């Protein structure tokens, strides 16, 4: 017979409050995962960087992108917030009204959102309107080629714009090609273009380079010619894991060092070289 003075210890599911068994909380809210993956429908910018310098490079690129967004579109990465009071004395009613107005402001998605990747030396920024990745990246690279020297890009290497993302399947490749290529190849005034295709495959074994090139070339359609060196347009295809991105860049891609910021920063602009040569000639005279 059990000792009445000894109480059996209640199990974790039998502990109670107020004499009633405490029910399990089956409705425990789960933390929602953020948009930490590249999704079909995204647009964005890839970047490569030095090993173990991803965090530093993300910050540096975000600063650069915000600077150019303001310059090109008059836009900032976040909704503007004016936290300073116009009156030094502190009008309480005005302060309260301002705080309430700030609370009611609709949240604005950032123009650039870095997506966490598990691949070293690789960075991705998701972009949103009004950012158009190809013209945006081209302007940055052209400015650097012309002599601009942005600060704090020591570890950043190549940046690659992506106009559209789809799932990394044959159907996804066809969908992306239809969306991205049409404005460049399928219009009434787009005949006779010379083009090249440059695929890049990371962490994906479902595709081969030849398969991508054949499929994209078929999507370009008739009336155009492949020219690997003298192309009018270059089609970039970037496959990363289970997503596929595509964009079309112009004939100065090679001249702009394939959008490699590190190489562009090390290149002396032609006009500087000419001025130095002229100065040297004058000294010799």
Image (cartoon, helix red, strand yellow):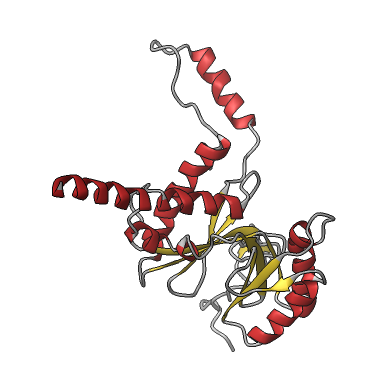
Furthest-right residue in this view: 188
What x and y, as percent, mark residue 86? Answer: 45, 14
Could you tell me which residue is drawn at 64 percent across and 84 percent down? Answer: 209
What x and y, as percent, mark residue 135? Answer: 59, 51
- Above or below — where is 42 with respect to 66? below
The image shows a total of numbered marks equal to: 0
Image quadrant of residue 107?
A: top right
What x and y, as percent, mark residue 75? Answer: 56, 37
Image quadrant of residue 180?
A: bottom right
Q: Is residue 171 left or right of residue 116?
A: right
- Above or below — where is 121 with respect to 151? below
Image quadrant of residue 21?
A: bottom right
Q: Is residue 112 left or right of residue 276?
A: right
Residue nearest the viewer, comparing 119 with 256: 256
What x and y, as percent, mark residue 79? Answer: 56, 36
- Pick the quarter of the image with the N terminus: bottom right
Could you tell me which residue is drawn at 45 percent across and 64 percent down? Answer: 257
Residue nearest the viewer, comparing 44 with 137: 137
Could you tell me which residue is drawn at 67 percent across and 86 percent down? Answer: 210
Is residue 192 visible from the viewing direction of this image?
yes
Residue nearest the viewer, comparing 6 with 168: 168
Residue nearest the viewer, comparing 76 with 218: 218
- Above or below — where is 152 with respect to 19? above
Is residue 76 visible from the viewing direction of this image?
no
């Amino acid at each position: 017979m059990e000792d009445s003075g000894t109480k059996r210890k209640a199990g974790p599911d039998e502990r109670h409050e107020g004499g009633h068994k405490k029910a399990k909380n089956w409705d425990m809210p789960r933390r929602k995962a953020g948009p930490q993956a590249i999704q079909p429908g995204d647009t964005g910018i890839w970047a490569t960087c030095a090993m173990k310098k991803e965090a530093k490079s993300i910050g540096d690129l975000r600063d650069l992108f915000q600077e150019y967004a303001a310059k090109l579109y008059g836009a900032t990465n976040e909704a503007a917030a004016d936290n300073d009071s116009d009156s030094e004395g502190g009008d309480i009613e005005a302060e309260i009204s301002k705080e309430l107005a700030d609370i009611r402001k609709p949240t604005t998605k950032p123009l650039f959102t870095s997506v966490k990747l598990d691949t070293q030396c690789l960075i991705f920024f998701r972009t949103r309107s009004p950012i158009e990745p190809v013209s945006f990246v081209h302007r940055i690279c052209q400015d650097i080629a012309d002599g601009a020297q942005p600060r704090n890009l020591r570890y950043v290497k190549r940046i690659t714009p992506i106009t559209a993302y789809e799932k990394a399947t044959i159907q996804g490749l066809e969908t992306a090609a239809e969306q991205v290529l049409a404005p460049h190849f399928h219009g009434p005034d787009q005949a006779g273009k010379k083009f090249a295709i440059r695929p890049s495959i990371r962490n994906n074994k479902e595709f081969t380079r030849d398969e991508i090139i054949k499929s994209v070339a078929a999507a370009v359609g008739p009336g155009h010619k492949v020219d690997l060196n003298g192309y009018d347009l270059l089609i970039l295809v970037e496959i990363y894991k289970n997503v596929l991105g595509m964009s079309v860049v112009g004939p100065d891609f090679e001249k702009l060092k394939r959008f490699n910021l590190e190489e562009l920063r090390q290149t002396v602009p032609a006009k500087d070289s000419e001025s130095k040569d002229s100065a040297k000639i004058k000294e010799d005279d």
